[in-house]
Amino acid sequence: MIWSVLMRHKLRTTLATLGVFMGAMLLTCILHVLESVHLKLKNEAEGLGANLVTVAAGPVDFVRLVNEAEETSESSKAAPGGNQTSISENAKTTERQSASSPPPKAATLTEADITALVEGLPQVVQGVPFILASGQAGSGLRRSSCQMLGTTSAFPELRRFRPEHGRFFSDDEALEGARVCLLGNSLAKWLFSSPEAALGETVRVEKSRLRVIGVMEEKGMDPSGLRMDELLILPIASYIRSTGRQEHISGAWLALRDRNDLESLKNSIDTLLRERHRLPPGKNDFTLTMGDQVDELVGNALRLVRTLGIIGSGLSFAIGTLGILSIMTLLVRSRRLEIGIRRVAGATRRQILLQFMGEAAFMSAAGGFLGVCSALAFCLFLAASGALPPYFSLPISLGVFALSTCCGILAGTYPAWKAARTNVLQALRAD
Protein backbone atom coordinates (compact mmCIF):
# COMPACT_ATOMS: atom_id res chain seq x y z
CA MET A 1 0.00 0.00 0.00
CA ILE A 2 2.80 2.42 0.90
CA TRP A 3 4.56 1.74 -2.42
CA SER A 4 1.43 2.33 -4.50
CA VAL A 5 0.70 5.59 -2.70
CA LEU A 6 4.23 6.93 -3.16
CA MET A 7 4.35 5.88 -6.82
CA ARG A 8 1.39 8.15 -7.52
CA HIS A 9 3.77 11.04 -6.73
CA LYS A 10 6.96 9.73 -8.36
CA LEU A 11 8.74 13.04 -8.86
CA ARG A 12 8.11 14.32 -5.35
CA THR A 13 9.05 10.98 -3.83
CA THR A 14 12.27 10.82 -5.85
CA LEU A 15 13.32 14.34 -4.90
CA ALA A 16 12.58 13.71 -1.23
CA THR A 17 14.52 10.45 -1.25
CA LEU A 18 17.47 11.94 -3.14
CA GLY A 19 18.66 14.06 -0.22
CA VAL A 20 18.77 11.08 2.14
CA PHE A 21 20.44 9.01 -0.58
CA MET A 22 23.22 11.58 -1.00
CA GLY A 23 23.74 11.92 2.73
CA ALA A 24 23.93 8.16 3.29
CA MET A 25 26.24 7.63 0.33
CA LEU A 26 28.56 10.47 1.32
CA LEU A 27 28.79 9.48 4.98
CA THR A 28 29.30 5.76 4.28
CA CYS A 29 31.86 6.45 1.58
CA ILE A 30 33.88 8.92 3.64
CA LEU A 31 34.01 6.74 6.75
CA HIS A 32 35.03 3.64 4.77
CA VAL A 33 37.57 5.46 2.60
CA LEU A 34 39.17 7.13 5.62
CA GLU A 35 39.52 3.79 7.36
CA SER A 36 41.06 2.35 4.19
CA VAL A 37 43.50 5.27 4.00
CA HIS A 38 44.41 4.78 7.66
CA LEU A 39 44.97 1.07 7.02
CA LYS A 40 47.13 1.85 3.99
CA LEU A 41 49.25 4.35 5.93
CA LYS A 42 49.65 1.86 8.76
CA ASN A 43 50.77 -0.85 6.33
CA GLU A 44 53.21 1.54 4.65
CA ALA A 45 54.62 2.61 8.01
CA GLU A 46 55.14 -1.01 8.99
CA GLY A 47 56.72 -1.67 5.60
CA LEU A 48 59.23 1.11 6.18
CA GLY A 49 60.23 -0.43 9.47
CA ALA A 50 58.57 0.03 12.81
CA ASN A 51 60.05 2.01 15.70
CA LEU A 52 62.32 4.24 13.64
CA VAL A 53 63.67 7.69 14.47
CA THR A 54 65.48 9.76 11.85
CA VAL A 55 68.33 12.05 12.87
CA ALA A 56 69.22 14.51 10.09
CA ALA A 57 72.10 16.95 9.92
CA GLY A 58 71.14 20.61 10.20
CA PRO A 59 67.83 22.22 11.15
CA VAL A 60 65.12 21.94 8.51
CA ASP A 61 64.16 25.39 7.21
CA PHE A 62 60.98 24.89 5.22
CA VAL A 63 60.89 28.51 4.02
CA ARG A 64 64.43 28.19 2.67
CA LEU A 65 63.54 24.94 0.98
CA VAL A 66 60.53 26.47 -0.75
CA ASN A 67 62.58 29.46 -1.94
CA GLU A 68 65.33 27.20 -3.23
CA ALA A 69 62.79 25.05 -5.04
CA GLU A 70 61.26 28.11 -6.69
CA GLU A 71 64.68 29.42 -7.73
CA THR A 72 65.61 26.02 -9.14
CA SER A 73 62.35 25.86 -11.06
CA GLU A 74 62.83 29.34 -12.52
CA SER A 75 66.44 28.68 -13.49
CA SER A 76 65.51 25.41 -15.17
CA LYS A 77 62.89 27.20 -17.22
CA ALA A 78 65.29 29.94 -18.23
CA ALA A 79 68.20 27.67 -19.09
CA PRO A 80 68.25 26.19 -22.60
CA GLY A 81 67.34 22.55 -22.47
CA GLY A 82 66.24 22.97 -18.88
CA ASN A 83 62.97 21.15 -19.42
CA GLN A 84 64.40 17.69 -18.87
CA THR A 85 61.73 15.09 -18.26
CA SER A 86 61.15 12.56 -15.51
CA ILE A 87 61.07 8.84 -16.14
CA SER A 88 57.32 8.70 -16.68
CA GLU A 89 57.10 11.61 -19.08
CA ASN A 90 59.39 10.88 -21.99
CA ALA A 91 60.99 7.52 -22.55
CA LYS A 92 62.67 8.59 -25.80
CA THR A 93 65.24 10.98 -24.38
CA THR A 94 68.67 9.74 -23.34
CA GLU A 95 68.85 11.90 -20.24
CA ARG A 96 66.47 11.97 -17.35
CA GLN A 97 66.05 14.54 -14.57
CA SER A 98 65.02 13.15 -11.22
CA ALA A 99 61.96 14.78 -9.70
CA SER A 100 63.02 14.32 -6.10
CA SER A 101 65.50 16.40 -4.17
CA PRO A 102 67.58 15.40 -1.18
CA PRO A 103 66.91 16.87 2.22
CA PRO A 104 68.98 19.84 3.37
CA LYS A 105 72.58 18.91 4.26
CA ALA A 106 74.91 20.31 6.88
CA ALA A 107 78.34 19.21 8.11
CA THR A 108 77.17 18.55 11.65
CA LEU A 109 76.77 14.78 12.03
CA THR A 110 79.40 12.05 11.96
CA GLU A 111 79.32 8.28 12.26
CA ALA A 112 80.87 8.70 15.71
CA ASP A 113 77.74 10.60 16.80
CA ILE A 114 75.56 7.68 15.76
CA THR A 115 77.81 5.20 17.54
CA ALA A 116 77.56 7.32 20.68
CA LEU A 117 73.75 7.29 20.47
CA VAL A 118 73.62 3.51 20.13
CA GLU A 119 76.08 2.94 22.96
CA GLY A 120 74.76 5.66 25.25
CA LEU A 121 70.99 5.17 24.99
CA PRO A 122 69.56 1.77 26.00
CA GLN A 123 66.37 2.37 24.00
CA VAL A 124 68.35 2.69 20.73
CA VAL A 125 69.31 -0.79 19.55
CA GLN A 126 70.81 0.05 16.16
CA GLY A 127 71.89 3.03 14.09
CA VAL A 128 72.31 3.06 10.31
CA PRO A 129 74.07 6.19 9.00
CA PHE A 130 73.47 7.48 5.49
CA ILE A 131 74.69 10.10 3.04
CA LEU A 132 72.10 11.38 0.58
CA ALA A 133 72.92 13.68 -2.32
CA SER A 134 72.01 14.31 -5.93
CA GLY A 135 74.12 12.65 -8.59
CA GLN A 136 74.28 11.43 -12.17
CA ALA A 137 74.26 7.78 -13.22
CA GLY A 138 74.95 6.64 -16.74
CA SER A 139 75.13 3.51 -18.83
CA GLY A 140 75.95 3.60 -22.52
CA LEU A 141 74.15 6.54 -24.08
CA ARG A 142 71.70 6.87 -21.24
CA ARG A 143 72.11 9.15 -18.25
CA SER A 144 69.82 9.92 -15.37
CA SER A 145 69.73 12.20 -12.40
CA CYS A 146 69.27 10.17 -9.25
CA GLN A 147 69.57 10.28 -5.50
CA MET A 148 72.80 8.65 -4.36
CA LEU A 149 72.41 6.93 -1.00
CA GLY A 150 75.54 5.87 0.82
CA THR A 151 74.73 3.58 3.71
CA THR A 152 75.68 0.33 5.47
CA SER A 153 74.80 -3.32 4.92
CA ALA A 154 72.13 -3.08 7.66
CA PHE A 155 69.97 -0.79 5.50
CA PRO A 156 67.66 -3.44 3.91
CA GLU A 157 66.67 -5.02 7.21
CA LEU A 158 66.17 -1.76 9.05
CA ARG A 159 64.14 -0.04 6.32
CA ARG A 160 62.52 -3.25 5.10
CA PHE A 161 63.56 -2.37 1.57
CA ARG A 162 65.22 -5.37 -0.02
CA PRO A 163 66.68 -6.38 -3.40
CA GLU A 164 64.24 -7.93 -5.85
CA HIS A 165 67.07 -9.12 -8.10
CA GLY A 166 70.63 -9.87 -7.06
CA ARG A 167 71.87 -9.12 -3.56
CA PHE A 168 72.81 -6.30 -1.19
CA PHE A 169 76.45 -5.50 -0.49
CA SER A 170 78.09 -7.33 2.42
CA ASP A 171 79.80 -5.99 5.55
CA ASP A 172 83.21 -6.64 4.00
CA GLU A 173 82.28 -4.76 0.82
CA ALA A 174 81.01 -1.86 2.92
CA LEU A 175 84.23 -1.69 4.97
CA GLU A 176 86.47 -2.01 1.92
CA GLY A 177 84.52 0.57 -0.06
CA ALA A 178 83.96 -1.90 -2.90
CA ARG A 179 82.91 -0.35 -6.21
CA VAL A 180 79.46 -1.93 -6.18
CA CYS A 181 75.96 -0.49 -6.12
CA LEU A 182 72.27 -1.31 -6.20
CA LEU A 183 69.70 0.48 -8.34
CA GLY A 184 66.15 1.48 -7.58
CA ASN A 185 63.60 -0.31 -9.74
CA SER A 186 62.68 2.70 -11.89
CA LEU A 187 66.30 3.75 -12.31
CA ALA A 188 67.25 0.24 -13.46
CA LYS A 189 64.42 0.20 -15.99
CA TRP A 190 65.54 3.55 -17.35
CA LEU A 191 69.23 2.75 -17.71
CA PHE A 192 68.74 -0.83 -18.91
CA SER A 193 66.07 -2.75 -20.76
CA SER A 194 64.81 -4.39 -17.55
CA PRO A 195 65.79 -4.73 -13.88
CA GLU A 196 67.18 -8.21 -14.53
CA ALA A 197 69.37 -6.90 -17.34
CA ALA A 198 71.08 -4.47 -14.96
CA LEU A 199 72.74 -7.22 -12.92
CA GLY A 200 76.47 -7.39 -13.55
CA GLU A 201 76.48 -4.25 -15.69
CA THR A 202 78.58 -1.16 -15.02
CA VAL A 203 77.18 2.24 -14.09
CA ARG A 204 79.10 5.49 -14.40
CA VAL A 205 78.90 7.69 -11.32
CA GLU A 206 80.92 10.89 -11.41
CA LYS A 207 84.40 9.67 -12.46
CA SER A 208 83.97 6.14 -11.14
CA ARG A 209 82.44 2.96 -12.46
CA LEU A 210 80.32 0.80 -10.19
CA ARG A 211 79.22 -2.78 -10.76
CA VAL A 212 75.48 -3.37 -10.30
CA ILE A 213 75.00 -6.29 -7.90
CA GLY A 214 71.29 -5.84 -7.24
CA VAL A 215 68.04 -4.08 -8.11
CA MET A 216 65.70 -3.08 -5.30
CA GLU A 217 62.02 -3.97 -5.11
CA GLU A 218 59.43 -1.38 -6.09
CA LYS A 219 58.66 0.85 -3.12
CA GLY A 220 57.35 4.21 -4.29
CA MET A 221 57.81 7.28 -2.12
CA ASP A 222 58.57 7.21 1.59
CA PRO A 223 56.91 9.60 4.10
CA SER A 224 59.80 12.09 3.75
CA GLY A 225 59.15 12.43 0.01
CA LEU A 226 62.18 10.41 -1.12
CA ARG A 227 61.57 8.41 -4.29
CA MET A 228 62.89 5.02 -3.28
CA ASP A 229 62.67 3.61 -6.81
CA GLU A 230 65.12 6.22 -8.13
CA LEU A 231 67.92 5.59 -5.64
CA LEU A 232 71.45 4.50 -6.37
CA ILE A 233 72.61 2.72 -3.20
CA LEU A 234 76.27 2.11 -2.42
CA PRO A 235 78.53 1.76 0.65
CA ILE A 236 79.40 5.02 2.40
CA ALA A 237 83.13 4.46 1.77
CA SER A 238 82.40 3.84 -1.90
CA TYR A 239 80.36 7.03 -2.08
CA ILE A 240 83.20 9.11 -0.64
CA ARG A 241 85.74 7.44 -2.95
CA SER A 242 83.53 7.78 -6.05
CA THR A 243 82.49 11.38 -5.56
CA GLY A 244 85.31 12.83 -3.47
CA ARG A 245 82.65 14.65 -1.48
CA GLN A 246 81.68 14.92 2.16
CA GLU A 247 82.97 12.67 4.88
CA HIS A 248 80.26 13.78 7.27
CA ILE A 249 76.89 12.04 7.06
CA SER A 250 73.48 13.39 6.11
CA GLY A 251 71.79 11.55 8.95
CA ALA A 252 70.94 8.17 10.40
CA TRP A 253 68.01 5.90 11.06
CA LEU A 254 67.78 4.73 14.66
CA ALA A 255 65.98 1.48 15.50
CA LEU A 256 64.21 1.64 18.86
CA ARG A 257 63.54 -1.15 21.32
CA ASP A 258 59.96 0.10 21.65
CA ARG A 259 57.90 3.27 21.24
CA ASN A 260 57.38 3.90 24.94
CA ASP A 261 58.23 7.35 26.30
CA LEU A 262 59.32 8.90 23.00
CA GLU A 263 59.44 12.36 24.55
CA SER A 264 62.06 11.23 27.08
CA LEU A 265 64.06 9.60 24.28
CA LYS A 266 63.94 12.81 22.24
CA ASN A 267 65.29 14.78 25.18
CA SER A 268 68.08 12.24 25.69
CA ILE A 269 69.13 12.43 22.03
CA ASP A 270 69.03 16.23 22.15
CA THR A 271 71.18 16.33 25.27
CA LEU A 272 73.76 13.84 24.00
CA LEU A 273 74.21 15.44 20.57
CA ARG A 274 74.28 18.98 21.95
CA GLU A 275 77.03 17.98 24.37
CA ARG A 276 79.04 16.29 21.62
CA HIS A 277 78.64 19.29 19.31
CA ARG A 278 79.27 21.76 22.16
CA LEU A 279 76.30 23.86 21.17
CA PRO A 280 75.41 27.06 23.04
CA PRO A 281 71.82 27.56 24.20
CA GLY A 282 69.56 27.99 21.20
CA LYS A 283 68.76 26.01 18.10
CA ASN A 284 70.04 22.52 17.39
CA ASP A 285 72.30 21.77 14.43
CA PHE A 286 70.37 18.54 13.82
CA THR A 287 66.76 17.53 13.29
CA LEU A 288 64.85 14.64 14.85
CA THR A 289 61.84 13.08 13.15
CA MET A 290 59.96 10.91 15.60
CA GLY A 291 57.36 8.35 14.60
CA ASP A 292 54.71 9.99 16.77
CA GLN A 293 55.10 13.27 14.85
CA VAL A 294 54.19 11.57 11.59
CA ASP A 295 51.33 9.73 13.29
CA GLU A 296 50.04 13.00 14.73
CA LEU A 297 50.15 14.80 11.37
CA VAL A 298 48.37 11.96 9.61
CA GLY A 299 45.82 11.70 12.41
CA ASN A 300 45.08 15.43 12.29
CA ALA A 301 44.62 15.32 8.52
CA LEU A 302 42.28 12.33 8.71
CA ARG A 303 40.27 13.94 11.52
CA LEU A 304 39.88 17.12 9.46
CA VAL A 305 38.65 15.19 6.43
CA ARG A 306 36.31 13.13 8.61
CA THR A 307 34.88 16.28 10.21
CA LEU A 308 34.30 17.96 6.85
CA GLY A 309 32.71 14.78 5.52
CA ILE A 310 30.37 14.50 8.48
CA ILE A 311 29.37 18.16 8.05
CA GLY A 312 28.66 17.59 4.36
CA SER A 313 26.71 14.44 5.14
CA GLY A 314 24.76 16.27 7.82
CA LEU A 315 23.77 18.96 5.33
CA SER A 316 22.62 16.30 2.87
CA PHE A 317 20.61 14.55 5.57
CA ALA A 318 19.08 17.89 6.59
CA ILE A 319 18.07 18.61 3.01
CA GLY A 320 16.65 15.11 2.69
CA THR A 321 14.72 15.48 5.93
CA LEU A 322 13.23 18.79 4.80
CA GLY A 323 12.38 17.22 1.45
CA ILE A 324 10.52 14.37 3.12
CA LEU A 325 8.78 16.84 5.42
CA SER A 326 7.59 18.89 2.46
CA ILE A 327 6.43 15.91 0.38
CA MET A 328 4.60 14.37 3.31
CA THR A 329 2.89 17.70 4.05
CA LEU A 330 1.71 17.89 0.44
CA LEU A 331 0.59 14.25 0.54
CA VAL A 332 -1.50 14.88 3.64
CA ARG A 333 -3.23 17.83 1.95
CA SER A 334 -3.88 15.93 -1.28
CA ARG A 335 -5.17 12.84 0.53
CA ARG A 336 -7.68 14.42 2.87
CA LEU A 337 -10.53 12.48 1.26
CA GLU A 338 -8.67 9.21 1.76
CA ILE A 339 -8.05 10.13 5.39
CA GLY A 340 -11.72 10.98 5.89
CA ILE A 341 -12.91 7.73 4.31
CA ARG A 342 -10.52 5.68 6.43
CA ARG A 343 -11.71 7.43 9.57
CA VAL A 344 -15.34 6.75 8.64
CA ALA A 345 -14.42 3.12 7.96
CA GLY A 346 -13.15 2.84 11.53
CA ALA A 347 -9.47 3.73 11.39
CA THR A 348 -8.20 5.36 14.56
CA ARG A 349 -6.01 8.42 14.76
CA ARG A 350 -3.15 6.18 15.87
CA GLN A 351 -3.50 4.09 12.71
CA ILE A 352 -3.49 7.20 10.52
CA LEU A 353 -0.44 8.50 12.40
CA LEU A 354 1.46 5.23 11.95
CA GLN A 355 0.51 5.03 8.27
CA PHE A 356 2.03 8.38 7.35
CA MET A 357 5.05 7.90 9.58
CA GLY A 358 5.58 4.53 7.90
CA GLU A 359 5.50 6.16 4.47
CA ALA A 360 8.09 8.74 5.53
CA ALA A 361 10.27 6.05 7.10
CA PHE A 362 10.00 3.94 3.93
CA MET A 363 11.21 6.81 1.73
CA SER A 364 14.18 7.59 3.94
CA ALA A 365 15.04 3.91 4.46
CA ALA A 366 14.99 3.35 0.70
CA GLY A 367 17.26 6.35 0.15
CA GLY A 368 19.58 5.22 2.93
CA PHE A 369 19.76 1.64 1.64
CA LEU A 370 20.56 2.75 -1.91
CA GLY A 371 23.10 5.28 -0.61
CA VAL A 372 24.92 2.71 1.52
CA CYS A 373 24.98 0.18 -1.33
CA SER A 374 26.30 2.79 -3.78
CA ALA A 375 29.05 3.83 -1.36
CA LEU A 376 30.09 0.22 -0.76
CA ALA A 377 30.18 -0.39 -4.51
CA PHE A 378 32.48 2.61 -4.92
CA CYS A 379 34.75 1.39 -2.11
CA LEU A 380 34.82 -2.06 -3.71
CA PHE A 381 35.90 -0.45 -6.98
CA LEU A 382 38.74 1.38 -5.20
CA ALA A 383 39.88 -1.86 -3.59
CA ALA A 384 39.69 -3.78 -6.89
CA SER A 385 41.74 -1.11 -8.65
CA GLY A 386 44.43 -1.36 -5.97
CA ALA A 387 44.13 2.29 -4.96
CA LEU A 388 43.23 1.40 -1.36
CA PRO A 389 43.15 -1.78 0.71
CA PRO A 390 39.69 -3.33 1.11
CA TYR A 391 37.74 -2.33 4.19
CA PHE A 392 34.15 -3.02 5.24
CA SER A 393 32.44 -2.16 8.49
CA LEU A 394 29.02 -3.61 9.21
CA PRO A 395 28.42 -1.26 12.19
CA ILE A 396 29.09 1.79 9.99
CA SER A 397 26.75 0.54 7.26
CA LEU A 398 23.95 -0.37 9.67
CA GLY A 399 24.47 2.87 11.60
CA VAL A 400 24.10 5.01 8.47
CA PHE A 401 21.01 3.04 7.42
CA ALA A 402 19.47 3.50 10.87
CA LEU A 403 20.29 7.22 10.78
CA SER A 404 18.58 7.52 7.40
CA THR A 405 15.46 5.80 8.71
CA CYS A 406 15.40 8.03 11.80
CA CYS A 407 15.55 11.11 9.57
CA GLY A 408 12.42 9.90 7.77
CA ILE A 409 10.60 9.18 11.01
CA LEU A 410 11.55 12.62 12.32
CA ALA A 411 10.44 14.30 9.11
CA GLY A 412 7.16 12.41 8.97
CA THR A 413 6.12 13.02 12.57
CA TYR A 414 4.53 16.45 12.03
CA PRO A 415 2.68 15.63 8.77
CA ALA A 416 1.46 12.35 10.31
CA TRP A 417 0.23 14.23 13.37
CA LYS A 418 -1.61 16.69 11.10
CA ALA A 419 -3.17 13.79 9.19
CA ALA A 420 -4.31 12.13 12.40
CA ARG A 421 -5.86 15.40 13.59
CA THR A 422 -7.80 15.95 10.36
CA ASN A 423 -11.50 16.67 10.92
CA VAL A 424 -13.50 13.93 9.20
CA LEU A 425 -16.47 16.06 8.14
CA GLN A 426 -14.30 18.86 6.80
CA ALA A 427 -12.18 16.35 4.88
CA LEU A 428 -15.22 14.74 3.22
CA ARG A 429 -16.90 18.08 2.51
CA ALA A 430 -13.75 19.64 1.04
CA ASP A 431 -13.30 16.84 -1.48
Image: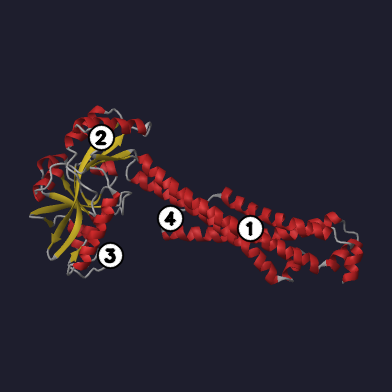
Q: Earlier in the sequence, mark 2 or mark 3?
A: 3
Whole-number angstrom distance, CA of label 4 to CA of label 1? 30 Å
Crowd class of label 1 (few under 14; some 14 to 19; many from 20; radius 10 Å): some
Disc 2 residue type? Answer: Gln
**Seen from this angle, which residue lies furthest front?**
281
Closer to us: mark 1 or mark 3?
1
Per the rendering, the mark at residue 318 is 1
Q: Name the residue under label 3.
A: 88
Q: Residue at x 33, y 39 (%)?
A: 290
Per the rendering, the mark at residue 126 is 2
Q: Which of marks 2 and 1 is nearer the N terminus?
A: 2
> Are the residues tagged 2 and 1 within 8 Å (C-beta)?
no
Per the rendering, the mark at residue 388 is 4
Whole-number angstrom distance, CA of label 1 to CA of label 3? 46 Å
Image quadrant containing the N terminus: bottom right
Q: Earlier in the sequence, mark 1 or mark 3?
A: 3
Which of the 4 quarters of the picture holds residue 424? bottom right
* Residue 113 rendering spot, x and y as whole percentages: 20, 34
Residue 328 vs 64, above or below: the answer is below
Whole-number angstrom distance, CA of label 2 to CA of label 3? 37 Å
Q: Earlier in the sequence, mark 4 or mark 3?
A: 3
Which of the 4 quarters of the picture holds residue 203? bottom left
Q: Which of marks 4 and 2 is nearer the N terminus?
A: 2
Whole-number angstrom distance, CA of label 2 to CA of label 1? 56 Å
* Residue 260 rendering spot, x and y as whole percentages: 38, 32
Helix, strand or loop at mark 3? loop
Q: In this view, does 406 lie to the left or right of 386?
A: right
Closer to us: mark 2 or mark 1?
1
